[in-house]
Each structure stands twice: as structure tokens, then as C-alpha cells.
Image (cartoon, grey):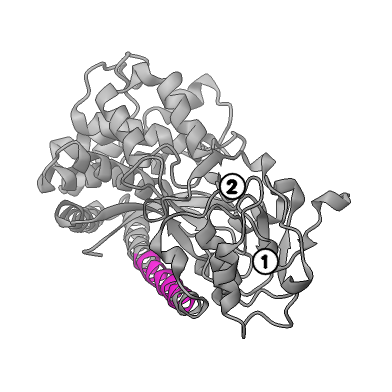
Amino acid sequence: MSNNSERPVAIHPSQVVVGLYVWLDLPWSEHPFLCNRFKVSNVQQIAAIHASPVQGKLYYLPEKSTAVPLPLTACDVPTGMSGEPDVAAEGLRSEAAPGAGKVSDDPSDDLSGKDWCAEIAREKQRKEDRRRTQQEVAARAERAWESAARVTREAMIQMTHSPKQAGAKLLDLSEDIAKRIAHGQEVVLRLIGDKGDEGPQFHALNVMTLSVLLGRVAGLDEGQLAELALGTLAHDIGKARIPTHILRAKNRTKYEEEFCRRHGAYGVEVAEVSGAFGQSALSIIADHHEYLDGSGWPTGKRNPGLAARIGALVNRYDRLCAPESPERDALMPTAALARLFRVESAKFDQRLLSMLIKLLGVYPPGTIVRLSDESHGLVVAPGKESLRPTILIYNPEFEKQDAPTVNLAEVPELRVEAALPPASVPADILHWLKPRERLSYFFSSDTN
């Protein structure tokens, strides 16, 4: 049960100082901030609060604040803020309390109250425009993923009885994806929204997406990317011959394990019959469990080709995040990357492992984070800078698919404070973010 110090305390806008953790009890569209709850970090935010319709709807949380509100004086109790724009300018001229910091020399600090109100209105519109643009980008990626998933699922079902037709479908899809990634000016890995059904296409598309993006960074050309896409999409097609209960078992008998380890050879057989696969793609199917230290299988090969090395690394990463057996614990993306780097690095090409870490960032898609303004979010795309990803901000005012995202590269005052294990996240936030649901990746680009 919460004590009194954990409850929000109502304050007047004139009492706000830097260091207060505030709650604006307003709809998201009625203020210019990314979140309704945040820690005030500069005097521009104070002025924006003054210029927003927060009278009677402004609170602070003492336990999350590093400062105390300014004293409330008799002249600080107007009947309404929205009709008194000069209060904003007056707020900037007030003396700062201890911990509030100094008023900056930014010319914007000298704006009049009316100018601030006009700027706040413009910023609210820009905020909504950004949200809609981000929704459109995410929706294009979702549609592209759904199309690729449909083709992949159909081809996997068809591969055992009509391998030529199935191979042709996968080849067409692989060439299309390679073309878009090779020629896209801006290609970004994205976390795809929650999908309710099951099927091998999820793992296949994850491995293909990450592999082709990694291959692009490694300098592969369009033809090589197409072969990489084809081989990674089909890397597990041999599992069609293996009973599901064996594949999903946490512990297998020696015979079952040997049987399961034949899936690469089975996959090569059917892929060769299809006539769609080149040698590079076939090597991925055969060798995606081979490791450079000789600990892999089926042959303990130490020198697989580049495409197979990419496939093996990405396959392992995705299986750490999404084990085939429901009885095995899934790792959060940050933990999976840490394991690859700290425990299993001898198995993989060090250059590729470094590229994968840079591609995914310090906070890979699917990571729950706490930001410097104390808000929570889910990483949906890595950024050009590894410490500044794009984050879906927790906001229960929206359905998850409609909620705002923020590219930290565009908001320099905001940063990730920590990656959080699910157990440390409040239950209501965890339920909204749904981080434990299967992670699905695809890409967005200017050619989607």
C-alpha cells in the first residue's frame, strides 16, 4: 500500500522548478510534451507548463523529484491560466529555488506570454504530425512484414510436395527484399507489433531480416544479399521431416538429438530439388549450426563461408530471444547480446559480432527502458547512435499501436537511464508494453 509521500501533490504552475517530477492531468494532445509525467529539466519546460492549460490539473511526485516547489504566495493564485499569458513570461523572471538551475541566455527565454502560447500551439501540432508520420512508417513496415510472412508460410507448407513452386516463391521474395535493402537510402530495423498466430515464418523472417541488414553492413552486393535472404528464409525447412514434439522438447534423447541435427541435410535435399538455391544459400541451410571453434554441428566445421557465418550468428541470437522449446527461458535482447559477447564469442566471427552489436545498438529492439524523465518505453528501432534508439513511450491514453514514439537522436535532452528486466517494471506498464510476447523484426525503408 502506498504511503502519502508517493501520492501526487497538487501545485500551482508558478511553483514549478527544475528537478520536480510533474504530472499534467491533461489529454496528450493538449500539451507539448512527449509524456504526461516527466522530470522538469530546463526553464523552457517551465515556460511551456505555464503556457499550457494546467490550472488545477498540475501535480508533482515528491519521491521522484530532486527539488521542492517554490513557495505559493497570494498573488500566485489567479482564477485561470489560459487567459493570462503574461504569467509565462513572469515565471521565467522568477528567482530559481535551490536545485532549479539558472535561467539560460537562450533568446527564447525572452518571449512574451502570448509568443509562448503561440509556440506551444505550434509544438503541439508538430508533436501530433510526428506521431502520425511515425504511425505511417510503422504501418508500412507491418504491411510489408505481413506480405512476406504470408509468402514464407505458403512456401514452407508447399516445399515438401511442390518444391519447385515453393522455391520460386522464396526466390522472388528474396530478390525483392535484397533490392529494397541494397538500394534504400534509409533502411531501419523495426520491431513489429504483436502477432497472435504461430508458425515457423516468424523465426525465418527474423533471421532473414537481421542477416540481410548485417550483410549490407558487411558490404555484400545485391546478388549476394538475395542469396543470403533465400538461405536464411529456408534455413530450417528440413525440420518439416521432424516431429514437432521432438523439436519443442526441452530435453531430447540421444536418438532424438541426432535426428534433429539432420534437419540441415534434409533441408539441403529439398532445396536442391527446388532448383532455386545457389551454393551460398545452400551453405546457410547446411551450416547454420557450425561454429568457428569447432563446437557446432553436424560436422564441427571450423571454416564455414561468410553467408553461413552470418546465418549462424543471427540464428543463435534469435533463438536466445525466442527458444524453440516453450520450456526454455527467453532472454531479453540486451541479455542475449551480452551472452553472445561475453560467453559465446569464440564461436562467431568477431567482425560480424561487432557489426551485429552496432546494428542492434546498446538497447536492441524489444528492450524495456527507463528514460531520464522517468518515463518508460519499449525500444522499437535502433538509432544511428547506439545509445539513442527510437522508443515507443508508455502512454495508457493510447492503444499501443497508436502511441507516440520518440527518436532520441532528435531529442538531445532525453536519454536512456537504464534497460529494465520485466520483473522490475510496474505491472500496468508491463501489461501495456507486452515485452514478453514474441519479438518479430522487419525493416522500414524509403522503398517499402
Instruction: Give the camera-side residue of 374 and 108.
Output: 108
**Mark 1 = which residue?**
14
Instruction: Give the camera-side residue of 161 and 12.
Output: 12
Element carrying mark 1: helix
Task: Answer with left or right where residue 372 lies relative to residue 310.
Answer: right
Q: Is residue 124 magenta?
A: yes
Residue shown at 37%/36% (left/top)? 315
Instruction: Give the camera-side residue of 254 and 436.
Output: 436
Task: Answer with left or right where residue 339 lies relative to residue 345.
Answer: right
**Circle nearer the N terminus (1, 2):** 1
Look at label 2 and name its amino acid: Arg
- Residue lying farthest to the bottom in this orientation: 83
> Residue 209: x percent and y percent?
31, 48
Image vertical order of residue 307 relative to residue 426, above or below: above
> Residue 225: x percent and y percent?
17, 45
Residue shown at 23%/47% (left/top)? 230
Instruction: Give the camera-side residue of 372 and 196.
Output: 372
